[in-house]
Image (cartoon, coloured by chain):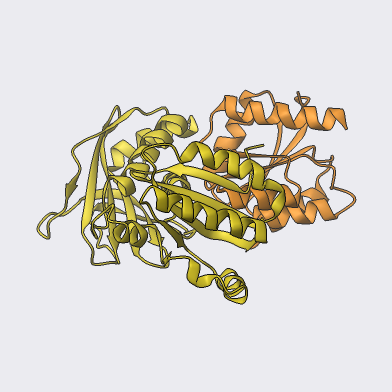
Chain colours: A orange, B yellow
Amino acid sequence: MFAPTTRVLIVDDMSTMRKIVGKTCKELGFSDLTEAADGTLAWEALQNAPAPIGLIISDWNMPNCTGIDLLKRVRADSRFKGVPFILVTAEAEQHQVIEAVKAGVDQYVVKPFTKDDLKTKLESVYKKYAKS
Amino acid sequence: MQNSLPFSFIKGDGYVTLRLVGSMDDDQIKLFEASLALQLSDPCPHFIINCEHLSFLSKGWVRAILKLKTDLKTYNKEMRLILMKTPLINQLKKEGIDSSFKYAAGLREALVELGLVTKKMLDTDFINPFLNATLNVLKVQASVDAKPGKVFVKTDAQKSIGDISGVIGLVSDSFSGSVNITFPEKVFLEIVSGMLGETYTEMSQDIVDAAGEITNMIFGQAKVILNEKGYGIKTAIPSVVCGKNHSLETLTKGPIVVVPFESSKGSFFVEICLSA
């Protein structure tokens, strides 16, 4: 599993969902959490973080820069393309899942979710990166 | 990751929706034909082909779908293609086979043509996904057990009063409407306290955000179920209305179905309005 010291970037335009994701991450042992309210602010946070971001958990539908836009930007930049990326969405329709996979997402979490749901997804992403 | 096959079968009452996604190339046909055989057992259903996210059909797929149409005929059943997009219509026209198929604007229109439903817009097929999504979202995200009461159609004289409402539009190519979820302040403050693990005693931006997020989750979950069947509901952004004892006017003129809920935190209700 990811080390508890992994710096996690939580991206969501809704403060409520940032709180829920943050609370769940804390329950799973993470202590170094950074928040951003959309993809543009997340991109700034990635570049300005005092220590490297080790995991991004981002909402899909956000104003200015969506989760998919952020994902594409991250995957296209040699500095960040290896950062594990999880999308959180309320609308996991099949065509959207295909779009996210094509863009390079590692996992997606469908809202509403439990601590165990997020833990399972994190474990699967960790295993993927541990293998490569 | 979730099953990402480009086709899926969703069972309805007397019909099966076959959902095709993306560019359908020949490599999945054998798997499709094997899966299809399981769907054609007696009593054979009508078939709705949901083309909302379908961009291309290879010659092999066209043959497979024409064969399905012939097979259905032997059972005295029919097929409808719904939510067709222009590039696909043009492809079928170019190949001279567009008249081999029957089309309908959306699922509802297809089911009416097949004699499976009446023109009535709001039925359990449409309401239940919202009802189930409401129960699930509150249970999973806020640990609130709720129970639906008796569903009723609202009359002009009935006002639905609440203190905070999440509102989201229901828009497709063939109908429009809205879903409102309305709570008394005290009930909603307790729900959000459970959701965020903090005690909230008065309205704040967090509370407003939470109403939007709950509405978004309920809509998202119901939309996936309805769109798999072929309702073609488009993505929408929720808004939140706050105010002591407010009541909401719906944007469309159709009938309004009210689903009252009782929960461990108190009562609240969901209203669904649709018009063609």
Is residue A44 visible in the rendered structure shown here? yes
Name the side, left or right, on which A19 lies relative to A7: left
Q: The C terminus of chain A lies in which quarter of the figure?
A: top right
Position above or below: B75 against B52 = above
Does residue A130 lie above or below B49 as drawn? above
Q: Is residue A6 left or right of residue B178?
A: right
Could you say which quadrant of the image residue B118 lies in?
Answer: bottom left
Quick check: A87 above or below B98?
Answer: above
Q: Residue at x 53, y 58 (%)?
A: B66
Q: Is residue B199 visible?
A: no
Task: Name the quadrant of the N terminus of chain A.
Answer: top right
Where residue B247 appears, as percent x and y from the top left, is 22, 56
The answer to whether A18 appears left or right of A7 in the picture is left
- Residue at x 36% of width, y 39% of height: B43
- Rendered location of residue A97, percent (x, y): 63, 47
Q: Give the camera-side residue of B198 and A27.
A: A27
- Residue B275, given in percent of the width and then of the height, sits at 28, 64
- Measuring from the top left, give residue A95's x and y in whole percent: 60, 52
Q: Residue furthest front?
A: B74
* Image side of residue B151 versus residue B141, left or right: left
Q: Is residue B109 above or below residue A42?
A: below
Question: How many marks on residues?
Answer: 0
Question: Hey, which residue is sitting farthest left in the picture?
Answer: B157
Residue at the spot 43% in from the left edge and 37% down from the top edge: B41
